[in-house]
Amino acid sequence: MKSSRVMKIFEQYVRKYDMNNVNIKAKYFHSLKVMEIAKELANGLGIFDEEEISVIELIGLFHEIGNFSLTPNYHIDDDIDDAYDKTINILFTKGLIREISKETKYDNIIKMAIYAYDKDGFPSDIGEKEKHICAIIKDAHNLDSFRLFVNYPYVDTRIDAYPNNLVYDEFKKFHTISPKMSENSSDTVLVVLSKMYSFNYRYSYYLLRKNNYITKMMDSLTFDNKEIENFFKQIMGVLNNYIDGKIGAYNAW
């Protein structure tokens, strides 16, 4: 799979949409960033050959191709099941994947990784490499959620209330929080922050720290009062310590 051909087909598909629309633009750059991060993670593991890395790049680039037609307003937590069905329909039923490559041996892992990137865990009946591919796409997608929040705020960044108790309890347990639990802008901030709890690789935490996303998220928020601001500052402090623990002193992997 030649990367130039993959990119050409991707560009031809997405250019059907209005690239001046900020929501479409967000989807476009999210796709590119997930591909980029996935490649970096795959190379770092050192277990994939060149062809397999090309497949991982393809999955990253097309993992949400169905989202372009879902809603006029981009949301990192769009209905994933619906997005999955649309993505699989575009790639396999309508045959976009065959325009990229006639090779079918990677079809199952492409479908599996696209299905699993926003789910808990991985199928138990797949090999180690396949699990790593699913984990790479999941980490790449979740990591880019932080950049999206900072660059394309899809919620009101004005914080005028504390998070609800259920959301905060899950957050304190280091659980990934479902966006369906969110009731206000504070909840949504915690939903995004909790995505780091599902990272599979130390290097993902390293990239989170390298890009300074926690500080950038905090800086993007405006608070109605000092008490709520201090509450979030404490959360950010705890998270920075959590990230330090995950990265370790020396080795990003």
Image: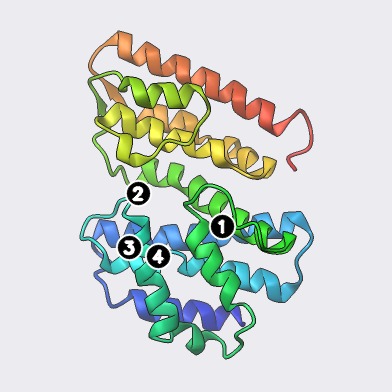
| Residue 84 numbered tag | 4
Determine contact: label 4, label 2, CB under 8 Å: no
> CA gap, disc 1 to disc 3?
18 Å
The amino acid marked with disc number 4 is Tyr
Circle nearer the N terminus (1, 4)? 4
Circle nearer the N terminus (3, 2)? 2
Placement of 132 over or under 164, stated as above or below: below
Q: Residues within 10 Å of mark 4 (few under 14, many from 20)?
A: many
Q: Which residue is mark 1?
A: 137
Q: Which residue is mark 2?
A: 77
- Which residue extends farthest top? 227
Image coordinates of residue 83 in percent, x first then y, are 35, 63
Front tag of 3 and 2:
3
> CA gap, disc 1 to disc 4?
14 Å
Q: Residues within 10 Å of mark 2 (few under 14, many from 20)?
A: some
Identity of the residue drawn at 61% across and 21% down: 241
Q: Secondary structure at mark 2?
A: loop
Q: Secondary structure at mark 4?
A: helix
> CA gap, disc 1 to disc 2?
16 Å
Image coordinates of residue 233 in percent, x first then y, are 43, 16
> CA gap, disc 3 to disc 4?
5 Å
Q: Which residue is mark 3?
A: 82
Quadrant of the drawing holding the N terminus: bottom right
